[in-house]
Image (spheres, rainbow, N blue to C red):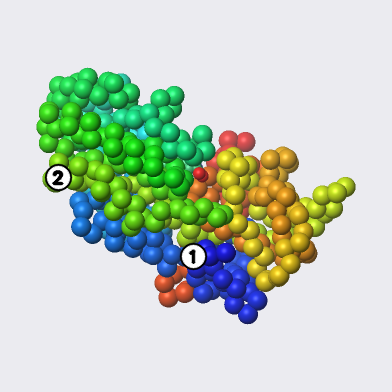
Amino acid sequence: MNFPGINYKQGILHFSDVSIKEMVQNYKTPLYVYSEDVILQRIDSYKKGIQNYPFMLCYSVKANSNLSIINIMAREGLGADIVSGGELFRCIKANMPTERIVFSGVGKTQEEIEFALKNNILLFSVESIAELKRINQIAHSLQKVAPVIIRINPDIDPKTHPYISTGLKENKFGISSNLFTEVIEFALSLKNIELLGFGYHIGSQIIDISSKMEAAEKSKYFIDIFQKYKAMSFFDIGGGLGIKYKNEQPTEPQEFIHTIANVLPMDKLKNCKILLEPGRSIIGPAGIFLTKILYVKKNYHKLFYIVDGAMNDLIRPTLYQAYHEILPIFEKNDFDQVVDIVGPICETGDFFARERKLPLLQENDYLAILTSGAYGFVMSSQYNSRPRSAEVLIKQNKELKLIRERETYEDLIQKEIQYL
Ligand code: LLP
């Protein structure tokens, strides 16, 4: 097995030394639970890696944007990688210093750019010439100078799921690298833009890091071009380090940083901050999703565990055919049933696992869906008018802290009722 913080003690599944039975009794299901210990271990691996290098860690807020989670990152000295005004708002509320925030994304709106400029963020990662013009105009009207890096599209295959590959020619992200000099010259000609460097992000859940090495190798050429114009202050190599969901053997952050630092021309980047934007590799292993079996049903030859969580809570299995390990909270030895674990939503795509081997379980048994800390709650919706689940944090002192209340039926209609 071997997932951080997960083990059975006296026959009961524990996460970070706290009994999951206690969690479901106190907070009901469906429920997200995060472990501060595991978050800190993951951050620590990054911090150990960057010790002797000029790297800066910007947590990718999209992976999990709960205020308490962002606040842990801020407290630990990390910055943030954001992709919307909403994420900036969350960062501000969670006491993340805005001077540590990088704003990426292909479709920044006028309002978002203004909001970010007024809050003096560290950098805009700019994804098109049109966006550069727009930022320049807005900065001019606010009498500000916008700090900018160019995101290039290096045309590299990260060998991951196609929906989360971002650095290929055919993807919408970044600026074609053959336009690099043109963009640099254009940016330098704009009065309200301060061009400070460039970067890329090639994809997510990258297990085979050779693609990341290839990107680093390729970037040497672009670093040389950039430095012909001016010294680089920032070089952003994105996020994307993969984690273990099943039996993958991902590179640990610390090892990844050493490996990449050996490829990058560190002598040329002496006075430059190298930004890393990890999301999943910090928060993914630090979260689990808990759900209760409502019914056990046999249809023809198939066995179904119908649970109270659904695709609206955790969409990864159906959206990306993602595998998440699933364990019963009471220890059993015989994983001798082949079952589909499905939710109550009226779609055949509403499943957490298909044809999975699990023990024979019953109504009111509980399941833990592991490695759900990243892109879990943040991608949840109210589809089928299902209130979103609660979120709980296991603090370092093992105290359980509610960090988001379970939504109610009233929450579902709040924005509509006054217009009826
Ligand atoms: N930086 C940029 C510019 C990004 O677009 C992303 C993720 C990251 C950093 C963080 O990547 P990470 O370290 O978390 O891999 N919902 C999908 C993942 C989408 C990732 C989008 N971009 C999933 O559940 O697999």
Category of crowding for the residue at label 2, using alpha-carbon neighbours closer than 10 angstroms: few (below 14), some (14–19), many (at least 20): few
Residue 267 image label: 2
Give the left or right position of residue 298, taking residue 65 as reference.
Answer: right
> Residue at (26%, 31%) from the top-left corner?
150
Dot 1, how many residues are within 10 Å of its Cα: few (below 14), some (14-19), or many (20+)?
some
The image shows residue 24, relative to residue 276, as above or below, that is below
Are the residues flagged by discs 2 and 1 in contact, CB closer than 8 Å? no
Q: Residue furthest bottom?
A: 10
Among numbered discs 2 and 1, the one appearing first in the sequence = 1
Q: Residue at x 29, y 47 (%)?
A: 260
Label 1: state its secondary structure. Answer: loop
Q: Is mark 2 within 8 Å of ligand 1?
A: no
Residue 237 appearing in the image = yes
Q: CA distance from mark 2 to mark 1?
A: 36 Å
Quarter occupied by the C terminus: top right
Three-letter code, disc 2: Asp
Q: Is 166 drawn above or below residue 373 in the view shown?
A: above
Residue at 72%, 63% in the rendered image: 335
- Whether residue 365 is situated above or below residue 94 in the rendered picture: below
Q: Name the spot of residue 126 as percent of width and height, x first.
A: 29, 31
Residue 90 can be seen in this image: no
Q: Is residue 52 left or right of residue 246?
A: left
Quadrant of residue 327 within the rendered picture: bottom right
Across and down, in percent, residue 300 comes to 88, 47
Residue designated by label 1: 4
* Amino acid type shown at disc 1: Pro
Disc 2 on helix, strand or loop? Answer: helix
